Amino acid sequence: MFTTYQAKKFNIPTVDGISEKTMTEHIGLYEGYVKNFNAISAALEDLMKDPEKNAHALAELVRRRSFEFGGMRLHEHYFPQFEGGAKELDAKGKLATAFESEGGADMVKNVVTNVAKMRGPGWAILYYDTEAKSFLIGFSGEQHQGHFATLPIILALDVWEHAFILDYGAQGKGKYIDAFFKNLNWSIIEKRFEALQ
Ligand SMILES: [Fe+2]
């Protein structure tokens, strides 16, 4: 219940349109989520020794910890999507075939892009509902909120300003999203989907 985690390492290649400085600083932010999650875990364990006296602090930190967890796990979905370098979606693969029922891969990409362009920081997230055998697109503004509970994440697109402001300025979200898709290794997304079959 008060577990701690180790920050993961990512093998990010040169990404065309997202600078090494952005990636390095971004990974530093990710490591901050892990560190903060662990610090809150330790604090919770301590505060639980006297839950009545510490009720307010506990209530705040329990909520806060899921925010840190969301930041940790979403980034652990985000960075590996660049690993191995850009790779196009296999047009004859299982994921491309499944996308057909959603209007095709271009339509899915278009919907993800437009959700990512929504005002405000957050994450555009493509989920897969194994029960309904369909995809859902969502937007999580606060990393722990706005999710489709229990649904696995197929694709996670970070659109917090820290992901693009160094390279494209505060109004450069659109250009960054283009760079994201240009460099996306779709085989990672395909593996996530195929693991759910
Ligand atoms: Fe981020």
Image: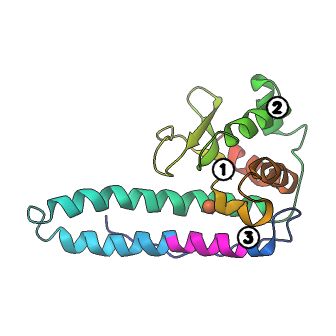
Front: mark 2 or 1: 1
Which residue of the protein is positioned furthest toward the front in this rendering? 170
Neighbor class of circle 3 (other Cα within 10 Å; few <14, some 14-19, many 20+) is some
Residue type beneath disc 1: Ala
Q: Quadrant of residue 127?
A: top right
Residue under numbered circle 3: 22
- Sooner in the amino-acid sequence: mark 2 or mark 3: 3
Report x, y in % for residue 165. Answer: 72, 61
Front: mark 2 or 3: 3
Q: From what the image shows, is residue 50 above or below residue 172?
A: below
Q: From what the image shows, is residue 106 above or below residue 124?
A: above
Residue type beneath disc 3: Thr
What range is drawn magenta here?
Answer: 22-32
Residue 97 has which mark? Answer: 2
Q: Which residue occupies 79% across, 37% down? A: 109
Residue under numbered circle 1: 156
- Sooner in the amino-acid sequence: mark 3 or mark 1: 3
Neighbor class of circle 2 (other Cα within 10 Å; few <14, some 14-19, many 20+) is some
Q: From what the image shows, is residue 88 above or below residue 24?
A: above
* Magenta highlight on residue 26: yes
Q: CA distance from mark 3 to mark 1?
A: 17 Å
Considering the whole magenta stretch, tell me its main secondary structure: helix
Q: Which residue occupies 81% across, 29% down? A: 107
Q: CA distance from mark 2 to mark 1?
A: 20 Å
